[in-house]
Image (tube, helix red, strand yellow):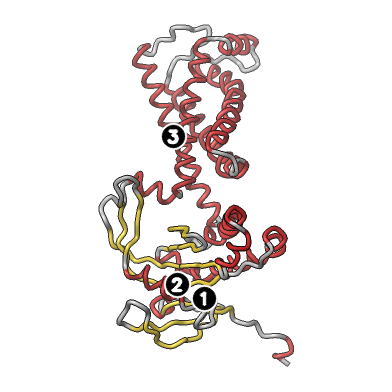
Amino acid sequence: MKITPKAKRNISRIIPFAIIWVLSGWIVDVTEFGVTRNQNLNPDIGIALTVPVLIFASLANAVVGLMLGALEVVYLEKRFSNQSLWVKLFYKFFTYLTLFIIIIVILYPLALALESGVSLLAVDAWQQLGRFLVSIPFFVTLFHLSVRVIVSLIYSTISENLGHHVFLNFFSGKYHQPKIEKRIFMFLDMKSSTTIAETLGHIKYFKLLDTYYNIMSDPIINSYGEVYQYIGDEIVISWKPDKGINQANCIKCFFDIRDHLNEQKEVLFHEFGFEIDFKAGIHFGEVTIGEIGALKKEIVFTGDVLNTTARIQSLCKELKSDLLISGAIKELLPQSNYQYSSKGEIELKGRNKKEELFSVTLEKKPTIANNI
């Protein structure tokens, strides 16, 4: 069974939750071991730290972290997407805390059985659970869980707002020193955006942009693209060469976005009164990537390829094409069901060198009538 790009992205976002929980669990266990010298100071409710218990606790923390991550990424993130940050954190925190109390009630007897060999069906096991639930160690455990939940939610919030790949790059320091890489860029711009904005007004136009970009999310993820910037009604998407060239993903992304918008055409028209369309330019070349900024840090791409891509996109109307690509990217693309029509060598503004541009359309499938 092939894992979809969206599933891969979700998995890569969920795994750090498990890492957070396992590492924080080890910190707690090592701290308690150092303080108590691994003596069970309260045998009526406590469980001594043995190797089997440590392994069980680590696995339990990993499973709980994965459960929390899956719930956060797949469901709760969307459920509270329209709420303010503090409302999100408040509801999520108490949702998770309730879930963990239920998990403690289930896992405590299992850990007790591992440590003492007591049967899960024994009355003593459940009496000890009852004593634990009203003890100071239980509330200390809740405090530890609360800290882990808060750390997990901070990670989730930063990852969601920065973008998962950007967050990992910041965390790993990958671009702390500038690096030169090759990238594919698409500049995608909404048509007639000025007219639409003037008609709708600021607030409603902003809601349109939010809906517009949300519709694009799946096509971008499924083509292995990364959002570099939102610039008003324009979005800049980038690909690493192997991801963007494979199966012509960078081209596929454009037409998938169009298909998704067409599926929501009636909904968008009913809510905003406009049929939304767009144009785009795609180019390939070297960029310098690095962290920049004093008051606010960002990972920034600089290079001629960005300016050239913007110029290509600006020629869409003049050359009567919704999608224009450069000769540099066309040479790299594999055979596919797209048609490329040369628009000739064009002198782009600000550049001395001419660039051959191509209009891209979907290849028309032959009809039965054509085959007779």
Dot 1 or dot 3: first in sequence order is 3
User: Callout 3, which amino acid?
Assistant: Ile
Residue 219's x, y, as percent? 56, 62
The one of 334 and 50 positioned closer to us in this rendering: 334
Residue 2 seen in the current view: no
Vertical comparison of 350 with 214: above or below: below
In the image, residue 81 above or below residue 352 = above
Q: Would you name the residue on which mark 3 appears?
A: 20
Amino acid carrying label 1: it is: Leu
Q: What secondary structure is marked by label 2?
A: strand
- Residue at 48%, 37% in the rendered image: 17
The number of callouts visible is 3
Label whose residue precedes the other's in the sequence (3 or 2): 3
Q: Which dot marks residue 323?
A: 1
Whole-percent x, y for residue 32 in the image = 39, 17
| Pointer 3 local density, CA inside 10 Å: few below 14, some 14–19, many at least 20 | some
Judge from the rendering whether residue 266 lies leftward or rightward of residue 63; answer left or right: right
Which sits in the foreground, 96 or 84? 84
Q: Label 3 to label 2, Cα distance in Å?
A: 39 Å
Question: How far is disc 1 from disc 2 in space, using C-alphas?
Answer: 8 Å
Instruction: Give the amino acid at mark 2.
Output: Ile
Could you say where residue 257 lies in the image, as x and y percent from the top left?
A: 58, 65
* Residue that carries the numbered disc 2 in the rendered image: 282
Name which quarter of the figure residue 258 lies in: bottom right
The C terminus: image quadrant = bottom right
> Is the residue 31 above or below the residue 275 in the image?
above
On screen, 195 above or below 333? Answer: above
Residue located at (40% from left, 50% from top):
166
Q: Check whether the beta carbons of the residues at disc 1 and disc 2 lie within 8 A of each other.
A: yes
